[in-house]
């Protein structure tokens, strides 16, 4: 299996939101990729600019960041030709590696805009190198910039940043520092195409947590009424657990819970409600992980604070 290290640069409407095409808010103008073999050594390179068809002038932020002239873009091939060659170049057995998750989201949006067939498997599992850097060197939750990671590892900054090919070189250098026996199981799942039915729902188990991605529902209420979504199986043994604290809203579209496994102790749960790419439906991403007494106390405090806020709001309504 090969590792395809991918980076994209894109443009957006020079007129801001008023000139934005909602089907393609970010138009890809450069694709850079490296193919790494099993030993993490570079086997091949892919780099090409893409002629813009939607936003034919560069947004001022794009001009500040990328190192591409309008002449280069005008002389480039269009997206359908470039992406066809890129997919062919990837081969048949590969996993995509990106710094963060946005590149895969925008790549698939661009593919759909041109009514091309999505070439990626479903579910699309990939390596988020930004997350792996955090797991390897920090707390697993922080998300650092590529330049920060390069400086942290004391690499020589011989290439500029914010170029698709240059950024893949830096990303590959960082990947070469990882102990892959420790991180290779931490695949990320792309959410651009959520499961369409119950049979396609995604279950991922890792050494220290478990992730579940639900099918699509028409409303947020339907999501949280589904028993599979709100179940709390132990992420170690799989036993379905009784909740010590039932799911409660902890901010925005996020819900928390606390359960107890007789063999493995507390399990802290978090559900994030997300919208489908067309903004018409909803799905849930549920994460369950072992928790200690401090984690359990934090969940209890969150629920108590919510109860106090609700009580205060009811009192204010009664007084008015």
Image (tube, grey):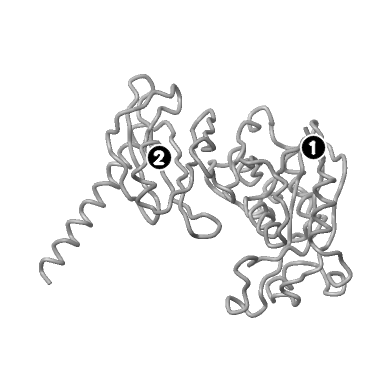
Q: Is residue 40 left or right of residue 190?
A: right
Q: On residue 82, which mark appears? A: none
Tag 1 residue = 92
Image height of 68 relative to 243, above or below: below
Which quarter of the image is occupied by the C terminus? bottom left
Which quarter of the image is occupied by the N terminus? top right
Q: Is residue 138 left or right of residue 255?
A: right
Name which residue lies at 83% across and 57% down: 82
Residue 269 picture location, percent across and down = 39, 38
Q: Which of 251 and 90 lies nearest the eye of the viewer?
A: 90
Residue 225 picture location, percent across and down = 33, 44
Residue 285 picture location, percent across and down = 47, 44
Q: Is residue 266 left or right of residue 158?
A: left
Tag 2 residue = 229
Image height of 218 relative to 241, above or below: below
Q: Which of 148 and 56 lies nearest the eye of the viewer?
A: 56
Counting residues from the start of the chain, the first of labels 2 and 1 encountered is: 1
| Residue 132 position by quadrant | top right
Q: Which of 266 and 230 lies nearest the eye of the viewer?
A: 230
Name which residue lies at 77% across and 35% down: 93
Q: Which of 51 and 216 lies nearest the eye of the viewer?
A: 216
Q: Name the element at disc 2.
A: helix
Q: Is residue 260 left or right of residue 95?
A: left
Question: Alpha carbon of mark 2 to alpha carbon of mark 1: how far?
Answer: 34 Å
Q: Name the element at disc 1.
A: loop
Name which residue lies at 34% across and 40% down: 257
| Residue 235 position by quadrant | top left
Residue 180 picture location, percent across and down = 69, 31
């Amino acid at each position: 299996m090969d590792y395809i290290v991918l980076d994209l640069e894109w443009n957006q409407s020079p007129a801001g939101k008023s000139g934005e095409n909602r089907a393609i808010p970010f138009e890809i103008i450069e694709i850079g990729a490296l193919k790494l073999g099993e030993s993490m050594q570079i086997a091949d390179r892919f780099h090409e600019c893409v002629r813009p068809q939607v936003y034919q002038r560069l947004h001022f932020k794009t001009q500040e960041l990328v190192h591409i002239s309008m002449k280069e873009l005008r002389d480039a091939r269009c997206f359908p030709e470039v992406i066809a060659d890129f997919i062919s170049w990837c081969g048949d057995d590969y996993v995509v590696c990106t710094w963060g998750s946005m590149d895969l989201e925008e790549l698939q949006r661009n593919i759909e805009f041109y009514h091309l067939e999505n070439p990626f498997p479903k579910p699309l599992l990939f390596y988020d190198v930004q997350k792996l850097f955090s797991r390897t060197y920090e707390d697993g939750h922080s998300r650092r910039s590529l330049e920060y990671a390069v400086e942290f590892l004391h690499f020589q900054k011989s290439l500029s940043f914010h170029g698709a090919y240059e950024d893949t070189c830096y990303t590959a250098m960082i990947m070469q520092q990882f102990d892959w026996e420790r991180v290779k199981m931490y695949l990320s799942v792309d959410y651009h195409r959520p499961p369409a039915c119950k049979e396609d729902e995604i279950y991922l188990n890792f050494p220290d947590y478990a992730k579940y991605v639900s099918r699509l529902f028409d409303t947020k209420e339907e999501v949280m009424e589904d028993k599979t979504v709100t179940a709390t199986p132990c992420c170690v043994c799989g036993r379905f657990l009784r909740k010590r604290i039932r799911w409660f809203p902890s901010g925005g579209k996020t819900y928390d819970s606390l359960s107890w496994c007789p063999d493995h102790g507390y399990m802290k749960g978090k559900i994030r409600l997300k919208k489908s790419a067309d903004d018409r439906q909803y799905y849930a991403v549920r994460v369950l992980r072992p928790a200690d007494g401090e984690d359990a106390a934090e969940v209890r405090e969150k629920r108590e604070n919510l109860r106090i806020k609700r009580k205060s709001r009811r009192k204010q309504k009664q007084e008015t």
